[in-house]
Image: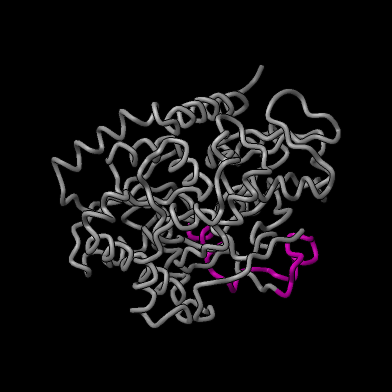
Amino acid sequence: MKTPVDIVPSLDARRQFLKLSTLFTAMGALPLLQMHKKAMAAEPNAPVRIGYLAVTDSTPLLVAHHNKLFEAQGLEVEKPRLFRSWAQIVEAFLSGQVNVVHLLSPMTVWARYGSQSRAKVVAWNHMSGSGLTVLNDINDITDLGGRTVAIPFWYSLHNVVLQHLLKSKGLESISEGQPGPKQVKLVVMAPSDMLPALANKQIAGYTVAEPFNASAELLKVGKILRFTGDVWKDHACCVVLMHEQDLEQRPEWTQKVVNGIVQAQAWIQDNRKETAHILAKDNPQRYTPHTYETLAQVLVPELLDTAQYEASGAIVNKDWKEKRIDFQPYPFPSYTEELVRKLKTTLVSGRNEFLQSLDPAFVAKDLVDDRFAKKAIQDLGGMSVFGLPDSYTRSESITL
């Protein structure tokens, strides 16, 4: 007889996916968008209302709130709202219950061009910060043949990078049925369900944001087969999404919101241990349910056992000198363009016909508004504050 951990994640994930599939269509999103329009009319000067999931991708939003960086900008801000699933956070955003969220970067593409929602990416939340975690007896990508791996959502960089790795080993990704020896079945699962599913051996692995990879290591139920930042250098899993209406009607307010987020990322650079304490469950704000030990494993660079990960193959590109997670806010256009190209050749379940008609260069300009991040960065002293060259262009590095 199956235990709840066997059946609940898959059923819940299917419900969440179906819900999101409806939300990310023009007709499905319409009632929520109408609710947002009414909310804006009733409250044109709404305070900063943050929506987030308990992953380290949300760190800058939470640090900005904790350190009162929004208040320092003269903004009114409410306590950030924790959501359990991407469906919940998207529904709250589209209806106007929250106005600043972090969202999976491919999901923002689906939001704008699938549901026709007027949403804009204004900044990145982080770089890297994700991994592919597997059972302890799996030592190579090829060992995943005939097995099941969980992803946080079809429209996620995790899915893109995982399929990139699987293809390199001649493995086919499937979404239905039993996988053959040269196939890997991908299932959508909430991050919080992945760890118990792995411990129960319901799945052979999962790819997700931290600290869920670190949790598997600390509990010794799994190991990191590969860091995603070692495949796509300095990628962004989650980005900051805001309503286009706010950008147009409240540009000064929007600039101040982005200022707070950018300042938080600059502060995190030199305060990694304190950042882990801020996010830990024993902080009075209780932003996340994670322990300091787990968060520090991700956020504090000194704790990264580079030699161990290089020996195991979790780190291949040694010259990249990637941190487990890093923070910088500028939304590089080259990343968005490459992301669109990759999505066109990645298996994504549900309605995805709009993808093939998307022009990468157009999406980079239409989906992303970098004005606010660029000004905030310049006011702080430029990209060098984040340890990067003073340039707003870069080349994408994706390898195996």
Magenta span has 314? yes
User: Could you tell me residue 44's position as x and y percent?
Assistant: 16, 48
Q: Percent x, y for residue 122?
A: 39, 59
Location of the N terminus by quadrant is: top right
Q: Total marks drawn?
A: 0
Q: Main secondary structure of the magenta part?
A: helix
Where residue 315 sits, quadrant-wise, is bottom right
Quarter where residue 218 is shown: bottom right
Q: Position of residue 260 (x, y in %)?
A: 31, 66
Quarter holding the C terminus is: bottom right
Instruction: Tell me how the rendering is colored.
Output: one colour
Residue at x 64%, y 38% (from the top left corner): 150
Q: Which residues are magenta?
A: 291-319
- The answer to whether 257 is drawn above or below residue 359 in the figure is below
Can I make out residue 73 in this image? yes
Tell me if residue 392 is in the magenta stretch: no
* Residue 179 located left or right of residue 107: right
On screen, residue 192 versus residue 275, left or right, reads right
Residue 127 relative to residue 73: left or right: right
Against 232, is 178 above or below? above
Residue at 70%, 54% in the rendered image = 224
* Left or right of residue 211, residue 146 in this image: right
Please say if 239 is above or below 190: below
Q: Residue furthest left?
A: 42
- What residue is shown at x 33% (from left), y 79% (from top)? 379
Residue appearing at x 18%, y 49% in the figure: 46
Q: Position of residue 209 (x, y in %)?
A: 56, 51
Q: Is residue 128 visible?
A: no
